[in-house]
Image (cartoon, coloured by chain):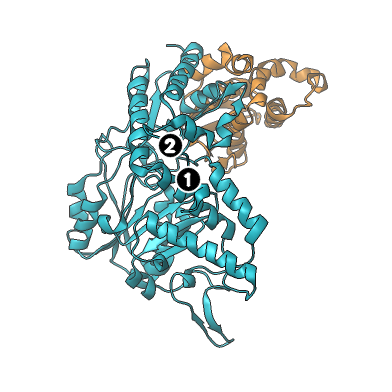
Amino acid sequence: MNELRELYQEVILDHGRNPRNFRRIEDADGEAKGDNPLCGDRVHVFVKLNGEGEVGDVAFQGRGCAITTASASMMTELLKGRSEADARRLFDLFHAVCTDEAFDPLDVPAEFEEDLDRLQVMAGVRQFPMRVKCATLPWHTFAAALDGKATATTE
Amino acid sequence: MSPDSTPTLRPNYDVLAIRRDFPILAREVFGKPLVYLDTGASAQKPRQVIRAMTEVMEETYSNVHRGVHFLSQACTDQFEAARETVARFINAPEADEIVWTRGATEALNLVAATWGRANVGPGDRIVISTLEHHSNIVPWQFLRDETGAELAVIPVDDAGEVDLDAYAALLGDGRTKLVSVTHVSNSIGTVLPIREMARMAHEKGALFMVDGCQAAPHMAVDVQELDVDFYCFSGHKTYGPTGIGALWGRKALLDTMPPYQGGGEMIAHVTFEKSTFKAAPHKFEAGTPAIVEAVGLGAALDYIEAVGRDAILAHETDVAEYARERLAAVPGVRIVGHARERGAIVSFTMDQAHPHDIGTIIDRAGVAVRAGHHCAFPVMERFDVGATARASFGLYNMKSEVDRLVEALDEVAEIFGR
C-alpha cells in the first residue's frame, strides 16, 4: 500500500478535487486538445503569451482521472510567468521525474530546484507504468499548444 | 468431443474444480491471490486448451489443405474438426458456413468489405445500436464513406435497453439493407432481444448480423433459432487463444459474396490473366490460417459444452447479480446499465474516484477490472460518463471474489474519501 500512498499524496488528491486554472482562455495564443486513447481521458489546454514571450496565462479544461487532473492543475501553476524555453525544460524535467528510474535530482541545475520539489510530488507514478501517460498528457498537450498543433496524444 | 476437453463433471457446479482447470488463477498479484474480473476483455485459458494446442505442435503440426503427406492430412482433419465444433456450438446447419477469422473484428470487417461492397449503395442504410463496440461501428463507417450509404443508430433508454419503436421507424421505409448489433453489450451488459429484432428486420427486407463476443462464452447460442443471417465471435473471449474467431453466414449469402483477401488457400486456379476462387468458406480464408489456434478454439468450445452452457449462465448470473447488489450498497457507487435482460457484466462509477484510480488501487489488492471506455465511446457519451470500471465475470468466478472487490473498494474510499 505504500506505493499507493506515494502516488495518491494529499497534494495530488487536492489538485484532483479542486483543480486550479480550470477554465477556458478565450483569447488564447495557443490551445490544443490532448487525448489518451487508452482510457478516454481528455484535456484542453489554453496558453496566452505576454509581451516578453513568457507564459502569461495557462489554463485547462477536461475530464480525467485524479492523476491527469492533478498533473494539469499543478502544471498550470508552475508554468505561469515562465519563458517558453523554461517551460520546455520543465516538461523534460517532469518527464524524467515520471519515467526515468536513474533520475538523479542532483543533476538538476540550481535554478530549477524549487520547480523540482513541486514536480517530484508526481514521482510516485514511476511505480505505475500504466499511469505515466495520465501524468504526462497535460504536458504533451501544453507543448502542442505552444507548437501550434491542434491535438496531442499519448500514443 | 475429445476426452481431454472433459472437465470432471460434478453436480451443483463445482467452481473450485473448474478453477483448477485454469492454471493462471492460482497465481498471486502483488502478494494477493488474483481476482480476475476482466473476462469480458479476454478470458483465461483452461489446461484443456493449452494441452490441445501443445499437442498439435508436438504431434500433428503441418500446413493444412496442401500436402499429400501424413501430417498434412492429420492436421487438416483436426483443423476441419474444429470448424465442425464451431458449427455445432452455434447450431449452424453446415460446417461450410463457418469462416475462420482473426476474431470478431475481422468478421465484421469481412462482411462490410465483401457483402457490403457488393450489396450497398447510395441511399441504402445500415443500422447499428448505441451499445456497439467500436469494431461494430468503424467497419460500417468505412462502408458508408465508400458507398454513400447512411449509417443510423438505434438509441437506448436510461436503463440501457434498445428503443424498439425507434428501431421500427428506422426499418420503416425499407431502405435498411443490414442491421448489425451486439448480442450482449460489452460495456454495460444489456442482452439485446435478437430474435425479435431479426424478425423485424426480415419483415422489412433487411439482413441481420450479430456480434456475439459477449454472448458465446456465457449462454447457449443457436443461430437457427435466433433466425439471423450472420453471427460472429472471438476465440480469446471464449476461453480459447487469441488470433482466431469465427464468422457464420447463411450459405446462400456466403456463396454470392465476393472474396475478402487474395492469396493462397482461397483460389481454385490462377493465371496472370484471371483467377478463380474456391467455394465458401475457403474463398474467405486467404493464406495459411491460424491452424493451432483453430484447434485451440475447438478445445475451448468443447470445454464450455462439457461444463454446460445453461449451468454456466445460471452460475454467472448468480455471481453477477450478487455483485450488483453488493456494489450498489457501497457509498458513492453508481451502476451504469439496468437492463432487465443482462449478462455477466457490471459497469460502475464511484463519485469519489475516477475509474482509472479505482482500477489502479484495487489492482494492488490483486483485483483486476477494466477501467476506461471499453471501446464503446458512444455508450460512455450516452450515459454521460467519461469512463467506467467494469467487472466482467466468467465461468470460474466466485461470490467470494465479489467480496474481495468490495473490500478493495474500501481502500479507494480510504484514499479518496467516503
Q: Position of residue A20 (x, y in %)?
A: 51, 19
Among the chains pictured, the one given orange colouring is: A
Read off the chain for label 2: B
Residue drawn at (48%, 69%) of the image: B284
Q: CA separation, marks 2 and 1? A: 15 Å
Check disc 2 and give the amino acid type. Answer: Leu
Q: Secondary structure at mark 2?
A: loop
- Compared across the picture, whether B223 is left or right of B83 comes to left
Count how many numbered circles sit on residues in the image.
2
Q: Position of residue A59 (x, y in %)?
A: 52, 27
The one nearer the camera, B358 or B1, is: B1
Among the chains pictured, the one given cyan colouring is: B
Position of the C terminus of chain B, as image quadrant, is top left
- Would you name the residue on which mark 1 appears? B6
In this view, B357 is above or below A30: above
Q: Earlier in the sequence, mark 2 or mark 1?
A: 1
Read off the chain for label 1: B
- Compared across the picture, whether B279 is left or right of A35 comes to left
The one nearer the camera, B351 or B190, is: B190
In this view, B113 is above or below B243: below
Crowding near pointer 2: few (<14 within 10 Å), some, many (20+)? many
In the image, are marks 2 and 1 on the same chain?
Answer: yes
Callouts 2 and 1 close, C-beta under 8 Å: no
Crowding near pointer 1: few (<14 within 10 Å), some, many (20+)? some
The one nearer the camera, B281 or A94, is: B281
In this view, B54 is above or below B83: above
Check disc 1 and give the amino acid type. Answer: Thr
Q: Nearer the viewer, mark 2 or mark 1?
A: 1
Q: Would residue B388 be visible to someone looking at this image?
A: no
- Would you name the residue on which mark 2 appears? B395
Q: Position of residue B75 (x, y in %)?
A: 58, 64
The one nearer the camera, A91 or A84, is: A91
